[in-house]
Amino acid sequence: MDPPPIHTIICLVCWSFWLFPFCASSGSRLLPDKPLSAGSTITSDDGTFALGFFSPSSSGTKHYYVGIWYKNIPKDNVVWVANRAMPIADPSSATLAFTNGSNLALSDTNGQLLWMTNISAAGNSSSEATGGGATLDNNGNFILRSSQGIILWQSFDYPTDTLLPGMNLRITHKTHALQRLVSWRNTQDPSPGNFSYGAHPDEFLRRFSWNGSTPYWRSPAWNNYLLVGRYVESVKSTIHFTLNTIDDEVYISFGLPEPSVSLVLLKMDYSGKMKLRTWNSNMSKWTDLRSEPKQECNKFGYCGPFGYCDNTQPIVTCKCIDGFEPNNKQDWTAHRFSQGCHRMEALRCGQQDGFLNLPSMKVPHESLHVKNISLDECIAECTSNCSCTAYAFANTSTKDINGDETRCLLWNGDLIDTEKLIGQGQNLYIRVHGLSDKKRKSTVLKITLPIVSTLLIIIWVCLVWICYLGGKQRNKNIWKKLMSGTSSTSFELCDGNLKYPSISFKEIVLATNNFSNSNKLGHGGFGSVYKGMLEDGTEIAVKRLSKGSGQGVPEFRNEVILIAKLQHKNLVRLLGFCIHGDEKLLIYEYLPNRSLDAMLFDATRKSMLNWPTRFEIIKGVARGLLYLHQDSRLKIIHRDLKASNILLDAEISPKISDFGIARIFGGDQQQENTNRVVGTYGYMSPEYALNGVFSVKSDVYSFGVLLLEIVSGSKTSSVHLKADFPSIIASAWSLWKDGNIKDFVDSSIVESCSPDETIRCIHIGLLCVQDSPNVRPLVSSIMSFLENGDISLPPPKESVYFSENNNGNDGAAENTVNSANNMSITVVEGR
Ligand SMILES: *[C@@H]1O[C@H](CO)[C@@H](O)[C@H](O)[C@H]1NC(C)=O
Ligand SMILES: *[C@@H]1O[C@H](CO)[C@@H](O)[C@H](O)[C@H]1NC(C)=O
Ligand SMILES: *[C@@H]1O[C@H](CO)[C@@H](O)[C@H](O)[C@H]1NC(C)=O
Ligand SMILES: *[C@@H]1O[C@H](CO)[C@@H](O)[C@H](O)[C@H]1NC(C)=O
Ligand SMILES: *[C@@H]1O[C@H](CO)[C@@H](O)[C@H](O)[C@H]1NC(C)=O
Ligand SMILES: *[C@@H]1O[C@H](CO)[C@@H](O)[C@H](O)[C@H]1NC(C)=O
Ligand SMILES: *[C@@H]1O[C@H](CO)[C@@H](O)[C@H](O)[C@H]1NC(C)=O
Ligand SMILES: *[C@@H]1O[C@H](CO)[C@@H](O)[C@H](O)[C@H]1NC(C)=O
Ligand SMILES: *[C@@H]1O[C@H](CO)[C@@H](O)[C@H](O)[C@H]1NC(C)=O
């Protein structure tokens, strides 16, 4: 949908907020001789923000306010309000004007002062102070300047309920007061509400939201990234919270998001939720990247002392720490958790205590921070003090202002507001009694363990034997049943990795807008790929295998098993999978730059890929392939390496995807035959296309074609078995033979490229596409050819097979089809 024209939006804003028949704008400056009155606005130079009079109420008695809002966003757009608690009843003669040139004041019809900047109160009584007028900057900051250009006052220093990028929130209070975002009372009333957000007065590295003066939610403690004077917390990988030290006070702000996120803000919502939101202009709505607390269980102290909120289970609820039990069992079973838990065995202080490790925890509230000590010293510190109930240690990897890179946290007494997180958090060590008990247990174990384990081994061996006899066949059947969903129509089996262990079909349907066409990223041989956004804002790509395609079934199983085991920065990450009835879904990380072919073969986007970037892509793909072929514990042949299966992340670094037809090889197995040739013509090696024989060298062949494509920027043109098979190889060869290989290089990279590197890459490409698999290099050699320009390369042998075909020998091509007749050849289209 095209955005509506600007004037339409302005008038919409006028309609929804002022309901005035006219709408005037007076540039980005407010000057001493020109007061602002209702009906006119000041607009930032780039048109993003507007300042003026508005009314948030849609019905009943209208109250008016002076504020700043996003001009092009039709709803929830106010980011700052001047007279929060002093509304204007009758806006007709209210003005925002300079008083005697020194201050900016808002007064109503009766001349009553509703709001003013109080600059002299800030310590400067220079009377011609505001001679510079006031401007609304493009970042939403309204600034009063003296005639010398000195900033006398700015709205960013007086946050209301919203933190904008570039805005600082003071979280220490050495010489100034702490700052907090304070919610509106409700959507129609900007006066200060019950909820606020900011740092705890004594613990500035943890942010809280409060309901009145009661903590309502607490952010996890910072873990690493303590930079000199700066602290960075990553949210969604690209939005960073930063700590800045200005004049001895620490401020928190958040940095620029990824370019595709045009607009973000942090808002203390009237509902009590701290929201990190972004405006989605396509859907014309706000999307919450974070909304805290997510659930009841995540509220501050909800699980009581020594209880913790377990976020890793499908039903997020409170639990007692191991070794503890509920204080009031009836309450606990009735889901009233506030009384918390107590130790099952009291601490006796001394040798008999040990520490229990709880991984992935949001550590409890109110810790003691001991600076500059090592892990051992941290443990000793806690062990030696009987009132120390827990410790947590982090090596922040970056030194703080004092050169300290450690963070030892200790707790006394009750542990409050602890949570078990998914894939984040840190180890928390809790003091428990019972080392002596454990000793006793361990002597018992010494006797029973060997017996039990011997028994277990015997049972295991038997099982393996039975499985071996009963065979793969039965396993396959179980999988088949599982996959076809015939066992039950309501059958659902969904699973994820550490981060999303409990992903459900319903969540995926929600995330992808019920697989709506607008979310569709592409379509391939096995089905469609959709973009989705999980509730926490994580973007995902969902591959939905076509329901009818029987061939997708083993591939599905294969891909899930395979990718779950693979972890490499040049392989796309599988986040989970889901089988629901006859739906089969794979959930991947979403990569904003989509696939290589969409960029490489697009006349305009191609320019984003200069030679150094392309060279990095080539090396990245090679590294990913090397991992598949030899560095992972399994040996994996991808079988369908091609430009559309190379996805690009935000940094344009490549990730190999689509392992649907990959094969795992046994340790010393060299090649395999298949009666089902799957892959994509043009990338398929002759021995695979014709005889169904594949090995790591068939992947090398595909890599060679890919390499030639990347250097030349043109597609291997063949979609058909007949006619000009990989013409790219033929054209590279003819130029190579004629000594004109420079002409093969993509004209759009000629300027950015190093001729040596490009020619070397073409040379490597030609080595990879040689007819005989035996003479093609292994990926490990390719890697060293790429990394080390001094290694001399063997001369390539011409790939005769396809060039002969290319010379118009139709008969040979027909024969090829015939000889391949008894295989089912499937051409898998890219995504
Ligand atoms: C403005 O000036 C008048 C006289 O010059 C003075 O009485 C008044 O207090 C001043 N107002 C402010 C807000 O400074
Ligand atoms: C500005 O001065 C007025 C009147 O003295 C006072 O009520 C108000 O709290 C002051 N505002 C600020 C932001 O200091
Ligand atoms: C007061 O104004 C003078 C000159 O206009 C400037 O140099 C000084 O920094 C200001 N002081 C404060 C506290 O703003
Ligand atoms: C704010 O607190 C008051 C009591 O202090 C309560 O009556 C009111 O419901 C609260 N408002 C919200 C939105 O929670
Ligand atoms: C906030 O606290 C008030 C009492 O002070 C309570 O009535 C209200 O329900 C609380 N709001 C939420 C969202 O918990
Ligand atoms: C919005 O739509 C445009 C084209 O319709 C597309 O290029 C862009 O990626 C979309 N942005 C988002 C955030 O979905
Ligand atoms: C912290 O980690 C860094 C790098 O891993 C290491 O060099 C350093 O010695 C560690 N510091 C402490 C105090 O353990
Ligand atoms: C250690 O014990 C002292 C009292 O002797 C107490 O004040 C202090 O907070 C304790 N520290 C820790 C980390 O347990
Ligand atoms: C931290 O401890 C080391 C060794 O214990 C010492 O050399 C260093 O000066 C300490 N740094 C600070 C900032 O106290």
Image (tube, rainbow, N blue to C red):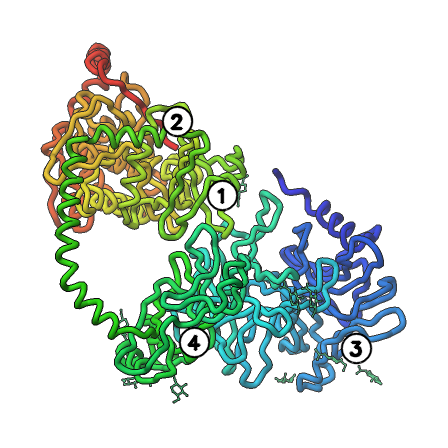
Q: Which residue is mark 2?
A: 486
Comparing 584 with 674, the one in front is 584
Q: Nearer the viewer, mark 3 or mark 2?
A: 2
Give the number of the disc on residue 743. none
Comparing 810 with 482, the one in front is 482
Q: Amino acid at mark 4?
A: Gly
What SS does tag 3 mark?
Answer: strand
Q: Looking at the image, is mark 2 or mark 1 earlier in the sequence?
A: 2
Q: Quadrant of the C terminus?
A: top left
Where is residue 104, by image quadrant? bottom right
Give the number of the disc on residue 229. 4
User: What is the CA distance from the residue labelled 3 to the residue labelled 4?
Assistant: 40 Å
Give the number of the disc on residue 507. 1
Residue at image point 64% right, 42% down: 3
Question: Pointers 3 and 2 in contact (CB under 8 A)?
Answer: no
Q: Looking at the image, is mark 3 or mark 2 earlier in the sequence?
A: 3
Q: Amino acid at mark 2?
A: Thr
Q: Nearer the viewer, mark 2 or mark 1?
A: 2
Q: Looking at the image, is mark 3 or mark 4 earlier in the sequence?
A: 3
Q: Which residue is mark 3?
A: 99
